[in-house]
Each structure stands twice: as structure tokens, then as C-alpha cells.
Amino acid sequence: MIEPQDLKPADFLTFRAPGRLLVLEEIAGEFVQMKKHLNGRELTVEVAKRVCTKSGTHLLKMVSPRVDGDHACLYIEPSNSNVRPKILPSTNAPDIPFCKVLFRPLEILDHSTASVIDHVMNPEDASAKVLEAFASVFGVEILDVVKQTLLDSARRVTKLASGEFPIIYVPRVGGGDLQITPVAPASAFNGMRAATGGFFLKQEENKPKVSRGKFHKQAISGKPQNISGAIGGTRTRLLAEMPAVFARDDAEIYRFIQGGSFPRWRDSSVATWVLKYADMLTADAEYNNQNTRNALDRTADRLIDEATNFIGETNAEIQIALGKLSDTSVALASPPDAVKVLLRRYWSEVDLYKARRALSSSHFQYRIAQSRAPLSEVAQ
């Protein structure tokens, strides 16, 4: 059994659970040791009030070091929960030892690990005895000011350091705009480190492979720690990468499989040939001869053949993409015909009218019918 005289001050005054299991009757003695290791510094009513006033769910100094000390702490209590959220202190360095008294996790046999602050914010079975032990050592007036400051005081942030905080405007229900400022909760700093601890474990031989992520640990100076003594000396960063972006053609194929439109034929020369075919139709009506008719047929057949080839090649790519999906029972829409493929591009209003008229002409429809007919029927 470890005796108190064998322990260091850091084993009593700490923001981390020291790993010493206590029974409920030993809590008063633990507070005596914590008071002893303050080395003569007194936890007064003023200090306790200052520590609790500057404790909250969001520490704005994490965003900007120029935040006013009276507006550095934000407390947000979710309206849909009957449990008060975890808070962290945000005090000057001289007050950190006192924070370690109030925020020190107490590991009690058969009870959850919780600090004096936790027992005040979210009382449980052992809370009454823990707080009674605390008051017996540090004074009832200290406990009273802690309760009053944490539970009764309205802590409001009314201003922010300009140029430091992201500002977003959203519409109000009744009209106008609402300015909002997103700020990450203080627990995210230490929570990130706790959540990613497993990714930094040493790989042991013949043991399951340790999962790795794109995380990076960075030592920080004492200044960020002055924001809150409860913040560790390392910052954990995550490199988040966007998924690979589909190439345009692949994206259009995937969209079609999901019920979207058929991929667009993006050959820029197609519009030129459609309009040229429209001009040839007009000329053929006035200067009709075998040469103009043959040229007209060749142009229509070229447009139809190339559109049909595009539809066939795209369908083949769609089937390949469909085979890579886990759900192969997707019901695909029918592909468009040649006319729709030729028209589906960007036109001016005049050119669109001209193209539609040409592709719906009796000549173009006849050439489509001929392209679908069996070879023996075409020969006749």
C-alpha cells in the first residue's frame, strides 16, 4: 500500500486521475493532503469564485489570445439533456494549483471517478459525502461559493475580439439575419488526444496490427496551457482529406446509375455538323440534285452513326461500373435515342430551333429508320 509520505505533490494536485483507488471514508484525508501540498497558499472565497467564474464548456482564448478576460469563457447547457456538460477552467497560471483541487478526479471504490466540480454539477450517490469532506477541510463558505457560482450565476459573453472569430450569417425565421460564431468545445482539445491514443500504440510482434491514422502530435508552449491548466502539453492534429473526386465522365455514369440523366456527349464538333446539316437541308429544297442528296445522306448518316456509337460505348461503361457495385439489381433507365443525344448540349435560342427542326425532318427520320433496317431490306 502506498503511504501519503511516499507520494509527490503531483500525485495529489493534478487534472488527471492519479490511479489510486480510495474508499469513501478516505476522501477527507485526501483533501488534507491536497491542502498540505498547496504549500501555504490558501484557497479563499475570492479564488474559488474566480476559478468557477472562469470555467466553462468553451474557452474562447483557444481561438484568440486577445479575448477579454471577462469574456473568455462560454458555458452552454444543452436544452435536451438533464446532465450538465463537462467544463474546464480558464484561469491565470497562479490559480492553476487551486484548479487542481477543484477539478482533481477522485477515484472512489464502487463509485464513478469525479471531481468536486463534477459532484456539484451532477450530484450522485457519493456526492453528499464527498462535498461534506471537502467542506470539512477547505471550509463551508468555499463550498457555498463554488455551488453558487457554478449553478446560479448567469455567465454571458457579450463581445468577441474583432478579426479573430469566424462569422457566419444565417436567416432569421421572422426576417433579417442572425450572426453566429462557431467555437469548438474545450473538451475537444483533450478529447482528441484521448480518442486517438490507440493509433499511437507500439506495434507488438505477433499481435493484431495497430490501426494508424493521419494524426500528428505537437508539443505546445506554456502560453496555450495558460488558457487552461487542464489542457495537456501536446496538441493532436488530424489530416482530413476529401475523397477522390470522380472524373466528369465517371461522375455522369454514376449519376445515371443512381437515377440521373444519361451522360452528355461533349464533342464540340457535333453542334457544328448538326447546323451544317440544317443548312444542307435548306439548300437541298432549292438546288436538288444527286450530288446534294448524296452529301445530305452522308452527313445525316455520320451524325446518326457517331451518336449510336456514343450510346453503345457509354452503355458498355455503365455495365462495367454497375458490376463494381455491391447492389447489382439496380433498374437502369432506357438510354436516349440518337436525336436526344445530338440535341443535349448547349445551344443559343436560334440554333436550338434550327437544330430541332433539322433533326425532326422527314429526311433525318428516314435515315434513322434506314440505319435500323436489316441489310437485305436496305439493299431493296
Image (cartoon, grey):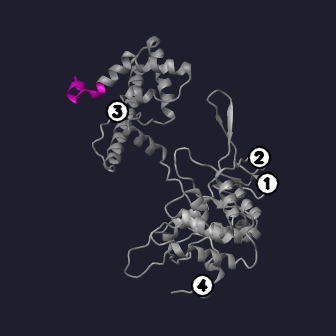
Position of 96 with respect to 130 (left or right) is right
* Structural crowding at the residue carrying mark 3, measured as other residues with C-alpha within 10 Å and reported as few (<14), some (14–19) or many (≥20): some
Q: Which residue is mark 4?
A: 4
Q: Which residue is mark 2?
A: 159
Q: Which residues are magenta?
A: 370-380
- Please state which amino acid type lies under the numbered disc 1: Asp
Mark 4 touching mark 2, by CB under 8 A?
Answer: no
- Residue 194: % across, % down: 54, 67
Mark seen at residue 30: none
- Residue 33: % across, % down: 64, 79
Label located before the other in sequence (1 or 4)? 4
The foreground one among 37 and 262 is 37
From the viewer's perspective, is the residue at label 4 or at label 3 nearer?
Answer: 4
Q: Which residue is mark 3?
A: 335
From the viewer's perspective, is the residue at label 3 or at label 2 nearer?
Answer: 2
Q: Which residue is mark 1?
A: 68
Q: Look at 56% across and 87% down and name the residue there.
A: 3
- Residue 137: % across, % down: 66, 72
Secondary structure type for disc 4? helix
Label located before the other in sequence (4 or 3)? 4
- Please state which amino acid type lies under the numbered disc 4: Pro
Position of 110 with respect to 186 (left or right) is left
Q: CA distance from mark 1 to mark 4?
A: 41 Å
Mark 2 touching mark 1, by CB under 8 A?
Answer: yes
Secondary structure type for disc 2? loop
In this picture, is 162 found above or below 217? Answer: above
Q: CA distance from mark 4 to mark 3?
A: 81 Å
From the viewer's perspective, is the residue at label 4 or at label 2 nearer?
Answer: 4
Residue lying farthest left?
A: 376
* Structural crowding at the residue carrying mark 1, measured as other residues with C-alpha within 10 Å and reported as few (<14), some (14–19) or many (≥20): some
Position of 77 with respect to 69 (left or right) is left
